[in-house]
Image: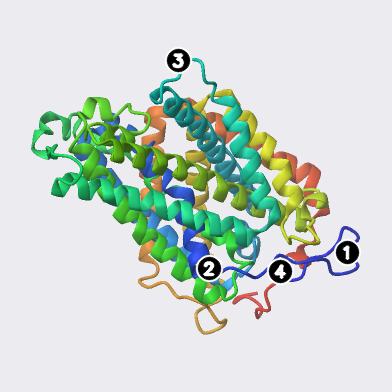
Amino acid sequence: MSDITANGAKPSINLSKVLGPIHVWALGVGIVLVGEFMGWNFSVEKGGALGSIIACWIIGLLYTCVAMIDSEVTSTVAAAGGQYTQAKHTTGPLMAFNVGLYLVLAYTMLEAADIFVFGDLVRIGATALGAAEGSVSAQPFVLLAVSVLAFLNYRGVLMTLNVNFLITAVAFFSIIILVFAYQFGVFTSEPLQHEGLGMGGLPYGWMGVLAALQFAIWYYLGIEGTCQAAEEVRSCGRSLPLGTMTGMITLLIAAALTWYVCAGTLPWEYLGTALAPLYDASLMSGSNFLVVLLWVGTVFSALASANGCINDASRAWFSMGRDRYLPEFFAAVHPKYRTPYRAILFLIPIAAAFGFSGLLAPTITFSILSGLLGYTFMPINMFRFRGKWPLDTIKRGYVHPFHPIPSIVLLVLCAATYVAVYLGFGTQLLAMMVFYAVASIWFVLCRYKYVRRGDQFTMAWPRPKGY
């Protein structure tokens, strides 16, 4: 896909096509796996231990539908921007602007939460090694993390995702080793005690399960970010569906193992409020090896997530600049490293500011709600995509089965999750809706006049059916 310079006259440098399925997997799983190390456990507080795992599988179905739909549309619309690019081809500028904004804010807020958690984990580790309580500040480590990750992303996507693959794999295998150690008595003699759940299973009944849906999203939030790699993979029709679907399978396994070991080692009342439940589960083992391993796994998961978020947020911001939804200044590609460097550098201070703020709960909720708004668009997009370009009219890299069932299921589950969010964060949900409404008005009044509709449609497709 060719880019254009600010004057629209001559082609500029394109993003590099250097990625394969393993990098797509590293991008998707790397962003999400931090949710297995922290965040998901707040669903236990809302719905109990059994309510949490029920919510986990319900939201797992939601994200399986997301992965299936994304794999078909993005393997066909092979351009950076992911769901934003899908929206501009199927729906129109206003919807595309909103979807792009959902993506950027979801990933930027998630990145802010990741680097905050990283800094806090370093502080906890320093205290465990003997440092005086309060003598180690998390903020310098937050700044160090965001600086190093920004440098990686600035220097090139291949190096960025190679690093992500390595640290994500270490984090994933740390979960497997912890479960293996407890299950077979390796490194520890402490048994898992699921039979002791008692009233901690469903203390609030099915209403608790509904309330738990909001935080069960944390098990999978970000897997849709694989779409942002569409313009940089060597074979989009093969690599993107393969990387996305294998990533979703990985996360389903990791989610089940995480719940299994944490629910079997920690009281549900404590588990529902813990900062890093897998690390706490390792502390219960009495094994220094497992404690160090899970501390490393938790730190790596936070870094991998922040690294992937920088990649995804910058691609969405870059794509919006390229299409003039934002100033064209952000559409620049580095002449040597072939990265959207201005988009990367612009978003880093925003994430760092929220990371320094320490407002973890509002930041996470902002990310979840932005992601949920994006998922709600997907069924609409899928119906329009299949309606405008039926299966026999354009070549698809992947065709997801059972249409329209996944779209209908996704829409129903999104509606249920909105109810769950409203129960816990109704005021913030309404405030966010007002924010996006104001942003839409700004786009219509200030930016729409710069959008060139004809330049947006970069795919060599026939005229849509009915037009």
Mark 4 and mark 3 in contact? Answer it, CB < 8 Å.
no
Give the foreground label among 3 and 2.
3
* Left or right of 405 in this view: 113: right
| Mark 4, other Cα within 10 Å: few <14 / some 14–19 / many ≥20 | some
Which is more toward the observer, 80 or 409? 80
What residue would you read off at disc 3?
Answer: 132
Which sits earlier in the primary sequence, circle 4 or circle 3? 3
Which is more toward the observer, 262 or 294? 294
Question: What amino acid is labelled 2 in the image?
Answer: Val
Which is more toward the observer, 6 or 269? 269
Residue at image location 33% in from the left, 28% down from the top: 274
| Mark 2, other Cα within 10 Å: few <14 / some 14–19 / many ≥20 | many
Vertical placement of residue 56 versus 365, above or below: below
Q: What element carries label 2?
A: helix
Tag shown at residue 73: 2
Which sits earlier in the primary sequence, circle 1 or circle 2? 1
* Left or right of 119 in this view: 259: left
Residue at image location 43% in from the left, 26% down from the top: 124
| Mark 1, other Cα within 10 Å: few <14 / some 14–19 / many ≥20 | few
Which is more toward the observer, 101 or 137? 137
Q: Residue 158 appears at what percent x and percent y?
A: 61, 62
Alpha carbon of mark 1 to alpha carbon of mark 4: how far?
Answer: 15 Å
Q: Is mark 4 on a helix, strand or loop?
A: loop
Which sits earlier in the primary sequence, circle 2 or circle 4? 2
- Can residue 87 be seen from the camera position used here? no
Q: Residue 319 appears at what percent x and percent y?
A: 70, 57
Question: What amino acid is labelled 3 in the image?
Answer: Ala
Which sits earlier in the primary sequence, circle 1 or circle 4? 1
Mark 2 and mark 4 in contact? Answer it, CB < 8 Å.
no
What residue would you read off at disc 4?
Answer: 457
What residue would you read off at disc 1?
Answer: 8
